[in-house]
Image (cartoon, grey):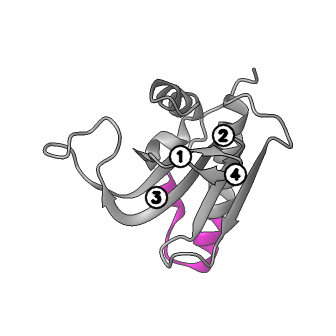
Amino acid sequence: MKKSKKVGLPLVDKWDGTPEGKARLHKGAQQVLRALAAELGLKKGEFEVRSNEMGPAIGGTIHLDAKALRVWIEGGYGFTPWGKSAETGPRTESYVAACRCEGGKDKGSDLVVDWELLWDPKKLVEVLRLEGFA
C-alpha cells in the first residue's frame, strides 16, 4: 500500500471568499481525496474524484466515488462530527461525509466527520474502517 502524506493545509484556510480561493479549495480538496483513495488501496479506474465549484454557494461540492464508498465535502448544516458529543462537542458547519454504496447508489447511513480529519488520510481511513465504511 502506498504511504500517504498528510497534506499540510486546513481546508478552512483555503477559502477566502474569492473565486480564486474557491479554485484553490477545490484543487487542494481533490488532491486530498486522491490521497485518501490511495490510502484505501484503490487503484486508478476504481475511483473518481469530482468537484463542482458552482454547487452550494459556500464552497461547491467535492466528491470521491468508489464502488462501495462515497466521500464528499459539505458545508453549512451544523452537524456534530464523529467522536464528539452533541451535548458537549462543538457543531461543525463544514464537514466530510461518507456513505456506503452498492452499484453506484447510496445505501444510506452517512458518517459525518470534522473536515480537519480529511487532511490526514491515514487517520480518516482508520475511522472509516472502525465504523465499517472501508
Q: Does residue 25 appear in this view?
A: no
For the C terminus, the image quarter is: top right
Q: Earlier in the sequence, mark 3 or mark 1?
A: 3
Q: Earlier in the sequence, mark 2 or mark 1?
A: 2
Residue at 86 percent across and 43 percent down: it is: 45
Q: Which residue is mark 3?
A: 12
Q: Earlier in the sequence, mark 4 or mark 2?
A: 2
Element assignment for label 4: loop
Q: Which residue is mark 4?
A: 104
Q: Does residue 79 appear in this view?
A: yes
Query: How far, Cα to Cα, is label 3 from label 1?
Result: 23 Å
Query: How far, Cα to Cα, is label 4 from label 3?
Result: 30 Å
Front one among 6 and 50: 50
Q: Which residue is mark 2?
A: 68
Query: How far, Cα to Cα, is label 4 from label 2?
Result: 7 Å
Q: Nearer the viewer, mark 2 or mark 3?
A: 2
Q: Amino acid at mark 4?
A: Gly
Residue at 64 percent across and 62 percent down: it is: 26
The part of the chain drawn in magenta is 11-25
From this view, report whether residue 64 is shown above or below residue 23. above
Q: State yes or no: discs 4 and 2 in contact (Cβ < 8 Å).
A: no
